[in-house]
Amino acid sequence: MTTRFLDPNVLGRISNLELLARTVVDGFINGLHHSPYFGLSVDFAEHRPYMPGDDIRRVDWRVFGRTDRFYVKEFEADTNANFLVLFDVSSSMQYGSGAITKLDYGRYLAACLSYFSRRQRDRVGIVTFAEDIVEFVPSSAKHLEMVLHTIDRIEAGGPGGLEAPLLKVAESVRRRSLLVLISDLYEEPDTVMRALDRLRHKGNDLIVFHLLDPAEIEFPFDETAPFEDLETAERIPVVPETLREEYRTLMRGHLGTLTERMNRSQIDYCQVDIAKPLDHVLRDYLSRRERLRRVR
């Protein structure tokens, strides 16, 4: 599969979300199998690297012949996991300076990760939230269709807030899970970390995809105009030329603080430019998930 088929602008022309997810994931997996980048790549659902003390009888010698590396076979009981998407649907996710909004990019990403995880025999689910939880589909081996249906009819609206809904998620998730947060993190770092630390303290693995529109990073605007806060509807007159460098400095500081704080809390954090193809994000997810499996 060529990169252009992972371009979010192209994906937006596919109306069927399940078809989109299957097209992206299957093509991405096929591409990885022909690439040395990950070695065994997505076969990690059925294999993992050999570790001292592993039963030698579980080594897959055919895989060794292909890769010159030792991998042991895993059984379905070893690999089943709970996978839960936490999807921010607050008003700020409606922003997009180009052909796609953060909400739509997040929709494609959530669908692909859910399809990919079910292919790996995980139990999949989703939570959508703004100030509070909007919908909650618990993780189950039978819930992929329901998850995709939920993603398909998402509409962003209302002010956002991480603390209240994520606290409810932390209280509701009984089994250790892999939680994937998709959000623009439109809050102060202290607030973000308080919300995320509650999830981490429950023993869950957490991967955060921070969706950013290119204009939010570069602030390329030239004309003086009122800027509207999508969360509060407040309008502020802005002269971009006088604020551009200060804005960029503040944004770099914000992103740097989030990076440092999440690293300190051992939370996998990925900044996502929504103008970039999905393969960048899928590769990042795959490498992080493999690492999580190795340290469990």
Image (tube, helix red, strand yellow):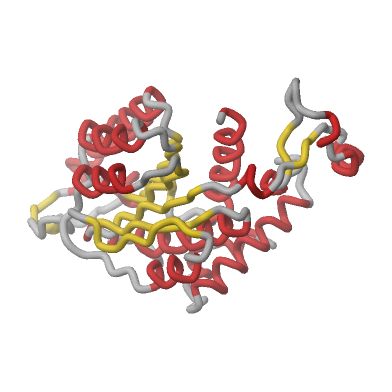
Indicate the quadrant where residue 53 lies: top right
Task: Give the number of marks.
Answer: 0
Q: Which residue is drawn at 24% across and 41% down?
A: 244
Classify residue 95 as left or right of residue 9: left
Res 235 → quadrant: bottom left
Closer-to-camera residue (74/24):
74
Spot the residue most to the bottom: 15
Q: Which of 115 and 81 is in front in this view?
A: 81
In the rendered image, residue 29, in percent from the top left (x then y), is placed at: 68, 56
Residue at the spot x=77%, y=41% of the render? 73
> Which one is in front, 225 or 60?
60
Residue 73 vertical position relative to residue 30 in the rendered view, above or below:
above
Please state if 294 lies on the left or on the right of 206 as rendered.
right
Residue 296 versus residue 32 in the image, above or below: above
**Residue 245 visible in this rendered orientation of the protein:** no
- Asked whether residue 170 appears in the rendered view, the answer is yes
Q: Position of residue 179 (x, y in %)?
A: 42, 45
Q: Quadrant of the N terminus?
A: bottom right
Q: Is residue 38 left or right of residue 6?
A: right
Quadrant location of residue 105?
bottom left
Q: Position of residue 119 (x, y in %)?
A: 62, 59
**Between residues 226 and 266, which one lies in front from this camera angle?**
266
| Residue 207 place in picture, x, y as percent | 44, 41
Image quadrant containing the C terminus: top right
Residue at the image position 29 percent from the left and 63 percent from the top: 135
